[in-house]
Amino acid sequence: MGEDKSYYEKIGLKVGLEIHQQINTKHKLFCKCPTIMVEDGKFKTVKRFLRPSKSELGEIDPAALFEYMKHKEYVYEVPEEASCLVELDEEPPHELNQEALEVALTVALMLKSNPVDEVHVMRKVVIDGSNTTGFQRTAIVAMGGYVSDEEGDVGIKTICLEEEAARKISETKDRIIYRLDRLGIPLIEIATTPTIKTPQQARRVALRIGRILRATGMVKRGLGTIRQDLNISISNGARIEVKGVQDLNLIPKIVEYEVQRQLKLLEIRDELIRRGVKADELEEKIIDITETLKESKSKLIRKSIMEGGGVYAVKLKKFKGLLGMEIQPNRRFGTELSERAKLFGGVEGIIHSDELPGYGISQEELNRIKEYMDVKDDDAIVIVCGKYENCRRALEAVVQRAREALMGVPEETRAANDDGTTRYSRPMPGAARMYPETDIRPISITEDMLNRIKSKLPEDPEETIRRYIEKYGLSRKLAEELIDSDRGKLFEEIVAKWSENATLIASTITYTINSLKNKGLPVENISEESLKKIFDLIGRGEMAKEAIPEVLEYITVNPNVDVEEAVKILGKGGISIEELEKIVREEAEKVKDVIRERGVKAMGLLMGRVMGIVRGRIDGKIVNETVKRILEEELKSLKQS
């Protein structure tokens, strides 16, 4: 599809973002526990089973009901150094973390958003076990504002302060284990209006917001600390929420593939209408076909029967050929049915007639199934294996998804796959999931508080990029890399002393360190002090810039060795011009006959010999100039003789 703006405008693409970023405060949002991850140790455990309840409107949220129907047990590991009775829901929450609130207000002001007069905490129903209470606490901090973009400003809908969910450690069919260290870490949520027009614009807006968050110097970095949710829709389609996108570069592909999915689902809807399919014709009539397949060579079926299960099927009237239709790369409409079956029934998957014969089921067996189930030529069959109750729930979910195909695109929450495709996660939450939190007092946002925050607002990232380009002569790409590396402050400190090396400093603390990281080296062992010392040595002529990668690599694997010692061990100490000249003259004398024969063309040979001796000890430009000067002197001397 590419980035054809007119194409996306024609199909009515609308994208909204929800950015979730952990705030790096000293304490959690509603208690004094530190915001740290605990990887090792012995943990106390607590078991819970959560149930949905009716809201103040007398309704049960569909997403909460879906999670409850999984009938999973939740086990919580309790690290004492990073959790307390608040996380266990055995003690009321404390007052809202003032430090976290000020970070959220800082971001709001940078996005030209309007802070609320009073912050009220709400409860949002969540019973997937990620919160021991069965709800997440959230509070609107500001509304309005915008993000500038080359395709037009994108509005900010809300900026909220929330508590982070517990960390999932493992999951089985019947149980999920969470750890409570992450639960309660302050989280800022920024929701845009659904006015993003193209896949690439979605990435740019997410990047712009991410840079503003990092500019505060108060957000956590690393895998899982920032997540993007995407709300995507097209004309005649539906709003789909794709949750938990961590790779910024995956955003355009997710949008493109969701557009493709919705267009294909609309094609399926139109074909079903053309075939005259009615919702009431799709019956949840589950047929036991175990006897028909008891002699089958299919490993799946034989395994199910040997374990005391059976084989069950439903007929989807006039669905032939549609289950095998590709709706995303390597994903078919049958995949959507399979995901529902897995989640609602706990089965391993489905087999459908568009892929039969196959899976060990022969054409003869397929013919017997069709005859037994009274299947017509334009009908489809869906088969599952396992215990009857699981298969019943699975096939009922399959039929329900088939009925939804008549509507086109069902609203739902989906999860992102690594390749940019998505999978069904749960129904879309309803309005009934929010209600007031009565254990926390409202907090007034005063003019004094806002003025104090305004007086120390960070520089806008775009202004910082422009300043790096104009003041230090960096390319835009390098300036952006520097901003995104989180090492801007270090750059400013070093460049203030050695401004003539601005590009070298910037490329070292971005590209060079990233290159070492990509080699699998522990770059966290390179301290800011080590980087400062390296540029001090270069600035004083005591080390050549060419030696930087080698010295840094040595430090990564020898963290107890300081820069000066590493330079000495590697033999990368600087040499004076006098020493260099001596080396050049000695090497020139060794190849005097070649110089006499080749003249200026001997430059490459002489340069290579000298660099083999002095590489990493003096600037290559100085070596080149010295070799050229001495070669000219030698040629002049030879000519005179």
Image (cartoon, rainbow, N blue to C red):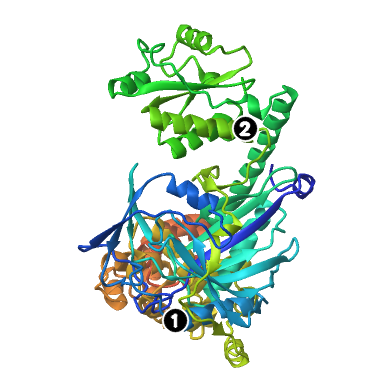
Q: Are marks 2 and 1 in contact (CB under 8 Å)?
A: no
Instruction: Name the quadrant containing residue 275.
Output: top right
In space, the residues marked 2 and 1 are separated at their CA atoms by: 48 Å
Residue 455 point in image, percent of width and height: 60, 90
* Quarter of the image where the N terminus is located: top right
Q: Secondary structure at mark 2?
A: helix
Going 51% across and 85% down the picture, which residue do you hit?
496
How busy is the neighbourhood of tag 2: few (under 14 within 10 Å), some, or many (20 plus)?
many
Residue 114 point in image, percent of width and height: 67, 78
Earlier in the chain: of badge 2 and badge 1, it is: 1
Which residue in the protein does label 1 denote? Answer: 95
Residue 605 point in image, percent of width and height: 44, 57
Residue 631 visible to an observer of this rendering = no
Going 62% across and 50% down the picture, which residue do you hit?
252
Give the farthest residue toward the bottom.
448
- Left or right: 192, with 38 as reference point: right
Tag 1: residue type?
Answer: Glu
Which residue in the protein does label 2 denote? Answer: 403
Give the farthest residue toward the top.
364
The circle drawn on residue 548 is: none
Give the farthest residue toward the front.
58
Going 39% across and 74% down the picture, which residue do you hit?
580
How busy is the neighbourhood of tag 1: few (under 14 within 10 Å), some, or many (20 plus)?
some
Instruction: Name the quadrant containing residue 153.
Output: bottom right
Residue 614 point in image, percent of width and height: 37, 68
Viewer-side residue, 484 vs 417:
417
Tag 2: residue type?
Answer: Arg
Viewer-side residue, 157 vs 613:
157
Q: Secondary structure at mark 1?
A: loop
Task: Please tell me how many numbered marks the rendered image carries.
Answer: 2
Going 69% across and 32% down the picture, which residue do you hit?
269
Residue 615 visible to an observer of this rendering = yes
